[in-house]
Amino acid sequence: MKVKRGIILIIFILIIIFAKSSYSKEEIDYTIKNVYEGDTLWSIASLEKENNTYYKDKDIRYVINDIKYINNLKNSSLYEGMQLKIPSK
């Protein structure tokens, strides 16, 4: 009975160790994008989708929502001089 508990405990510990290592997040670098007159969240997201491998093959709506989330934006309004944090690879 004690041997069974020991084996189960060892298996449980191994599962926890391997589960943590397989779910570790990859490190993300960020660049700062200055907002200029006429820039919109859509135009910035479009450029990032084309030129940033972090957003490769992502839907434009995903890119917009991700930029809003990262920068704690309540809506899509931008103003000249604003700086946006943009993830990059």
Image (tube, rainbow, N blue to C red):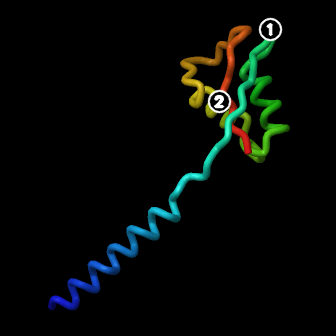
Q: Is residue 86 above or below residue 21?
A: above
Q: Circle 2: is it few (<14), some (14-19), or many (20+) Cα within 10 Å?
A: many
Q: Tell whether 13 sits left or right of 24.
A: left
In the rendered structure, find residue 67 and report the number of the disc placed on it: 2
| Marks 1 and 2, how far apart at CA | 18 Å
Q: Secondary structure at mark 2?
A: helix
In the rendered structure, the answer to whether residue 38 lies left or right of residue 74 reads right
Q: Position of residue 13 (x, y in %)?
A: 34, 73
Classify residue 36 by image quadrant.
Answer: top right
Q: Image quarter for residue 78?
A: top right
**Residue 48 numbered tag:** none
| Secondary element at image label 1 | loop
Quadrant position of the C terminus in the picture: top right
- Please name the residue shown 57% across and 30% down the image: 69
> Residue 27, percent across and down?
61, 48
Q: Residue 41 at what x, y percent from top left?
A: 72, 21
Q: Is residue 50 above or below residue 44?
A: below
Task: Name the amino acid type tagged 2.
Answer: Ile
Q: In the rendered image, which residue does mark 1 sit on?
A: 37
Residue at 78% across, 15% down: 39
Q: Amino acid at mark 1?
A: Glu
